[in-house]
Image: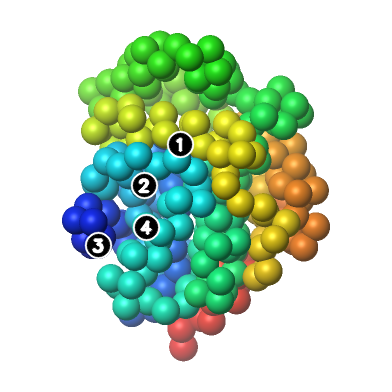
Amino acid sequence: MRDMSVQLPDGRSVGISGYGDPTGAPMFLFHGTPGSSQYLGLVDEPSRAHGVNVLAPDRPGMGRSDPHPLPSAAAYVEDVAATADSLGLSRFPVAGHSGGGPFALACGALLGDRVTSVATIAGGAPLDTPAVRDSLPPDDARALRLLEEGKERSIRRQLRVLGFLQRYLPWLAQAVFRRQVGPSDVPLLDRTTIKGFAAGLAQGPDGAIADYRILATKRGWGFEPADIAVPVHIWQGEEDRMVLPIQAHTLSEMMPQAELHLIPGAGHLAIFAHFGEIVDALGIPNKP
């Protein structure tokens, strides 16, 4: 992993984890919720093999990015554009894992021809869709319910406990996660991955809570997925127990223009074993 940061026009710092080939074709990859760019080291080897330079920024208040109120996924597009400007990138593909999926789609909808293609990887659909709501794992369902009931102190407590486990009792966090994921994900829940998750809550729960508010409703997204004009690919593991396949099917219904890729046997993290295929679908040329 390569640690770097850029400064936005308003003075905020954005932390970025770089993976793969630093001289390769660039792409942005957005992390899940709660989380940070540091768990995305799972893509390092396939990115290097394909000659791709993966740039994974932390969203405000998570990982190494300064906090900032984020009212919608659409609002995050300004940060992405400014980050790309600082890095000297004029055009690029974007992808988002899990809760990062809607932020990638927002870039595809609102950044015009700067974005060449978009992928969601186990990406979330609006959580107010009834079938999606019924499919949520217990922790996410409880967080959503607490937000709806205005019990912010309770969700803060829930996220602080999670952050404490991940940071100070990683073996216990591993045990908890292993009961929640499918068999293909279990070997990937090592200390490095748990540490990457923990970084998402190291500054406190505000960044994650902002994400939950955005992801909770289609209104929180702030754009129309059906309006995305560039190629869109929806990648989903059929054995994912964190983001169930119903979310991918819901996204597919929202975006008739998108191509749906269902991966047999793949879980929430194990889907990254197919990252090379995702890169190819995005149209990123392999480095000679």
Alpha-carbon span between mark 2 and mark 1? 9 Å
Alpha carbon distance from label 2 to label 3: 16 Å
Residue tagged 1: 211
Q: Mark 2 or mark 3, which has the lower sequence index?
A: 3
Of the image marks 2 and 1, the number of the one nearer the N terminus: 2
Percent position of residue 253, x then y? 80, 48
Q: Residue at x 36, y 47 (%)?
A: 59
Q: Position of residue 160 (x, y in %)?
A: 31, 19
Residue, disc 4: 79
In the figure, 162 relative to 50: above or below? above
Position of residue 124 in the picture relative to residue 201 (left or right):
right
The residue singled out by tag 3 in the image is: 9
The answer for how far apart the CA atoms under marks 3 and 4 are is 9 Å
Rendered location of residue 87, percent (x, y)? 30, 72
Q: How many other residues sit within 10 Å of disc 1, few (<14), some (14-19) or many (≥20)? A: many
* Vertical placement of residue 117 versus 90, above or below: above
Asked whether disc 2 touches disc 4, contact meaning CB atoms under 8 Å apart, the reply is yes
Binning the other alpha carbons within 10 Å of mark 2 as few (below 14), some (14 to 19) or many (20 upward) gives: many
Identity of the amino acid at label 2? Arg
Q: Are marks 2 and 1 in contact (CB under 8 Å)?
A: yes
- Mark 3 or 4, nearer chain start: 3
